[in-house]
Amino acid sequence: MEKFRFLTSGESHGECLTAIIEGIPSGFEINPDFINTELKRRQSGYGRGARMDIECDTVEIKSGVRFGKTMGSPVTLVIKNKDYQNWQKVMSIKPEDFTEEKSFSTCRPGHADFAGSVKYKTQDLRNILERSSARQTAVEVAVGAVAKQILNRFNIKCSSKILQIGKVTENFENEIDRVKAQGDTIGGKFEVVYENLPVGLGSHVHWDKKLDGKIAQAVMSIPAIKVVEIGENPLGYAGSEYHDEMFVENGKVIHKTNRAGGLEGGMTNGEPLVVKAVMKPIPTLIKPLNSADIKTMTNSEAHFERSDTCAVEACTVVAEARIACVLVDEILLKYGGDYAEDIIIP
Ligand code: EPS
């Protein structure tokens, strides 16, 4: 992202999560209540774990907003980890506080533990878990909630729904209960839709400017995502069945179907943007899988810490947020502007 950029920091059991957003023009209304509503959405959903009973994610806006509006300067967001009070010793920055409490060396298959331990040369997998945990997505949702408030000015609206949990397309809660009773976890498929986008966001001229590619990267890099689709999966369709025919109605070009999911040639085509994604089952399992202990180099059972049975609902909120950030960036790239009124979408 070139115009709307952000960096995040923070560990799952550290003091707080932080984001600095750069590139927001002045004059956009930012309401922290809306950010907190989004944070609550991420925390809820059937199948979440015990950590969500501890946290009550609330944003603190530390810079860049004055009297309810952006100032053009970087916006800093902070979310405190309530659980930090139970982890202060384990997460201390002081060398004299060294402890092996909560350290572990048996990798969780499917998580970042093994590759992270080799890459960052540590036998204490706590150092990898802390940043690879999906806890990080809380502050990303806060950033996305800022982006959504920018999109709101242009009447660009978002919705999402769960399509599938495991193999089940209805009665999601029953399926989550069934899996939970077995000490297991389950993934699923969801859909995010953005409506009222102008035609021509993105570009066909270079691979790295194509909006489908940018969205795929933004969604694919959410923890546990393995598949991203735009519109209908074309497998099995003939060309005549798949492509959305065009018509002119009331002097406007329209599509009566939207199998392309609102993107043609890497650009928005005026139809709703439809993004679907598949989340794998969370890899932190109560009933551990066979794994390797990288300290003793012996076969061992994977590390278990409390976990969610299913976080697909939370993941839809994270995907909404990631896509919102990409869309704001595209709008700023196409229409420019240093203050809100300066940005006019024809
Ligand atoms: C999460 C917080 C984490 C996990 C979960 C997501 O908290 P804790 O590790 O203290 O239980 O509940 O992350 C994972 C299960 C994972 O594998 O990354 C959150 O805030 O969403």
Image (cartoon, rainbow, N blue to C red):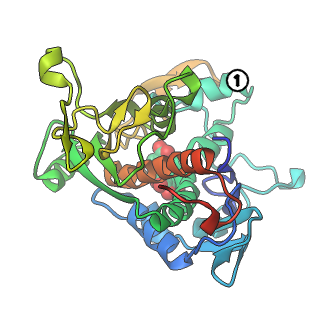
Residue at 41% from the left image edge and 43% from the top image edge: 199
**Quarter of the figure with the N terminus:** top right
Residue type, label 1: Lys
Q: Is residue 241 visible?
A: yes
Which of 178/233 is in front?
233
Q: Is residue 132 left or right of residue 287?
A: right
Residue at 49% from the left image edge and 67% from the top image edge: 153
Which of 138/108 is in front?
138
Looking at this view, name the residue that lies furthest to the bottom. Answer: 67
Task: Kindly indicate the quadrant of the structure image that contains residue 164.
Answer: top left
What secondary structure is found at the residue carrying circle 1? helix
Q: Is residue 103 left or right of residue 152?
A: right
Q: Is residue 237 visible?
A: no
Task: Kindly indicate the quadrant of the structure image that contains residue 45.
Answer: bottom left
Q: Position of residue 294 (x, y in %)?
A: 62, 23
Q: Position of residue 40 (x, y in %)?
A: 43, 69
Looking at this view, name the residue that lies furthest to the front. Answer: 251
Residue at 87% from the left image edge and 55% from the top image edge: 94
Residue at 17% from the left image edge and 38% from the top image edge: 257
- Whether the residue carrying mark 1 lies under 8 Å from ligand 1 is answered with no
Q: Position of residue 270 (x, y in %)?
A: 34, 44
Residue that label 1 marks:
119
Q: Position of residue 230 (x, y in %)?
A: 33, 33
Which of 71/314 is in front?
71
Q: Is residue 178 above or below residue 83?
A: above
The crowd level at tag 1 (other Cα within 10 Å; few <14, some 14-19, many 20+) is few
Which of 15/298 is in front?
15
